[in-house]
Amino acid sequence: YKSTYIPPPARYGGRHTVTLIPGDGIGPELANHVCELFRFCCVPVDFEVVNVDSSMASEDDIDNAIMAIRRNGVALKGNIETNHNLPPSYKSRNNLLRTTLDLYANVMHCQSLPGVRTRHRNVDIVIIRENTEGEYSSLEHENVTGVVECLKIITKAKSLRIADYAFRTARAKGRRLVTAVHKANIMSLGDGLFLECCKEVASGYPEITFDSMIVDNTTMQLVCRPEQFDVMVMPNLYGNVVSNVCAGLVGGPGLVPGANYGEDYAVFETGTRNTGKSIANSNTANPTAMLLASCLLLDHLKLHAYASMIRRAVLSILTETQLHTADLGGKGSTSEVVQSVMNAVQSTGPQTLSI
Amino acid sequence: MAAHTAVMSMSKILNPFWGGRLGHTVKVRLVIMYEMLILQPPPAKYGGRHTVTLIPGDGIGPELLNHVREVFRFSCVPVDFEVVHVNSALESEDDINDAITAIRRNGVALKGNIETKHTMAPSVKSRNNLLRTSLDLYANVMHCQSLPGVQTRHKNIDIMIIRENTEGEYSSLEHESVTGVVESLKIITRNNSLRIADYAFRLAREKGRKRVTAVHKANIMKLGDGLFLQCCREVASDYPDITFDSMIVDNTTMQLVSNPQQFDVMVMPNLYGNVVSNVCAGLVGGPGLVPGANYGRDYAVFETATRNTGKSIAQRNIANPTAMLLASCMMLDHLKLYGYASMIRNAILTTMNETRLHTADIGGQGTTSDVVQSIMRIIQSKGPLISEL
């Protein structure tokens, strides 16, 4: 039984409330920069900050965060570290968040950005990845010592849902080709079911071409000729690998934003979900991914003018090579980049005198 | 035989006193040593000529393997091929069982990829997979090197990928207990993980490599990939001259695309191995260039690394024969026919790098037969002249 009740938006007095989860590593500093920038641009968004401590075994922190997201409907988060030293019963916090809120679609748009020199040009791929099942069910057991079985779950309902989402998004963005990525020659029941569901949904969208490709061939084609791909839809693990390959193709983890959409909630973060522990607090992280993710957030809240203003500023700053951060081969610092973005916004925004 | 009895008596002496304290790894190490010393099948070598099983497969397999035979005949390589056809359209497993028996008999095989039709029932298992698991070819080794004559976006790549070949996601164990919900089992066992880690480190030491990277996803699959990682760490402790580190698979694929020169030897379970090896093949120039080898304890099967059937380019004389010919050189190395192997390998690399005769997949206009003719010409010009013998 699916409820048709749509929760009201958290908007009072014209200002939205958005949950902010700083996370670990470079998350807190980048979240601060986002708050700084929003304040500077007078964006009508208030952040409700919820801290999640990744070193604690209790699930209270993440439950609080989930409740805050249910209340506000929208969130911006940094990645929460999964400590390998804790026992296997400790589930990944990010995964818990995604499955509890049923954020079934992870959308990542990889585009070659002007100003960033990469080996591949004209890359423009939208990756839609199933976000809640597949290999990430966290269901494992060791019935016999030394033999571990991990279950990969594929269901018809979720595969139909993600395929439907992919085709609807492709139609909304005017895309012509949807490619399903799978490994049905080996996992014939599992990925076979996924592929069948995609084919069923494809028959309802005659103007969009549908084809499928095995994941190993896909990764090889991505490295040789990424221009051939348009929209790609796939289960969880392949989505992880393919989205990281595409992020590498367009310039690295510091440039691509990601969005997790569910029926009622949306959570925005960097596309490749890196914690960046080694570069935390050194002012060298690339803020572009997080800033573009916040623009996606503003688009979701229908604050399109603010979103395009900030996005334009961020992309114009990217073309200036002296401001590139270390991951793009430059020597700029995070604060310099954010300062320049604010200057760009100020110079192109409405003048106070003219209001 | 003497070594065999020595190991047996050593384990008998050690176990009563130290059994409990030695721990898992040493016991497993003794078991591995013991296994290596028991009966090895004799090589299929009669009258100085080896017999090798040849499985043409589908797509571009048959034509490429014909070229291999042509080159071998031309170079007077002392290898006879026993051809076994496997029909992928049949549901019965007789064909593949015949092929497996032939490989057990000969010990070595060269194969093309056998197609797995999606339209057949899920109970029809992948023939390639059946072959690998029945013969227990546990290690898939792929050496990706940038070739100077091939134009690629990345340079100076030299990565060895060692992939577990028999378990992991490829167990073909799936069921649908509830309609619309499919469970696929990914199996990771301690024995297989120790075995592949041991193989990786031994190979790294043999080839003088300095670093082994384990690729995993243990933050999500803690028990499964956690076990794999633990086994790699245990084995790494025995090889202090080699640095060991680990990397999550998503970060690995991104690093491979941005900065592939940082990797040296990589070891990983089955599915990640599939993806990573295809990414690396793409980095060095495509599926037509890299050979792959599947090693088991008693058998070895050689094929192209990315296992493509190439149905769309079959019978059109445009396939790149390099991968299959380099795979046949690896086979000759395995049979200890090093002279012939290096002769053919040099001819292939000269054609690739100096003559620059390229097929369509690497941007040239040559046909398969052109490339093979060029290789044979180079062998003829560099080889011993009949008048000198």
Image (cartoon, coloured by chain):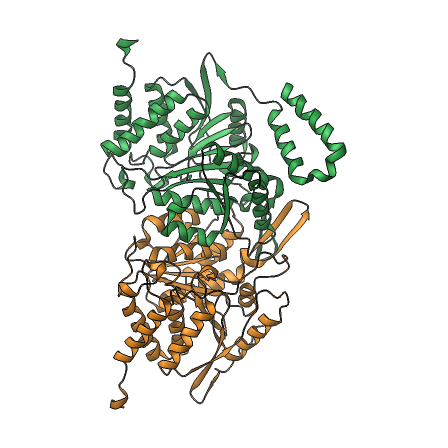
> B279 left or right of A142?
left
Looking at the image, can residue A185 be seen?
no
For residue A285, above or below residue B3: below
For residue B388, above or below residue B360: above
For residue A140, above or below residue A166: above
Q: Nearer the viewer, residue A152 or B330?
A: B330
Q: Colour of chain A?
A: orange
For residue B250, above or below residue B143: below
> B320 left or right of A189?
left
Q: Nearer the viewer, residue B337 or A109?
A: B337
Residue shown at 30% from the left, 47% from the top: B153
The quadrant the C terminus of chain B occupies is top left
> B146 left or right of B4?
left
Q: What percent of the width, then of the height, locates residue A282?
A: 42, 64
Looking at the image, can residue B189 be seen?
yes
- Furthest residue to the right? B16
Residue shown at 56% from the left, 50% from the top: B225
Q: What percent of the width, then of the height, locates residue A143?
A: 68, 48
| Chain green in the figure, letter | B
The quadrant the N terminus of chain B occupies is top right
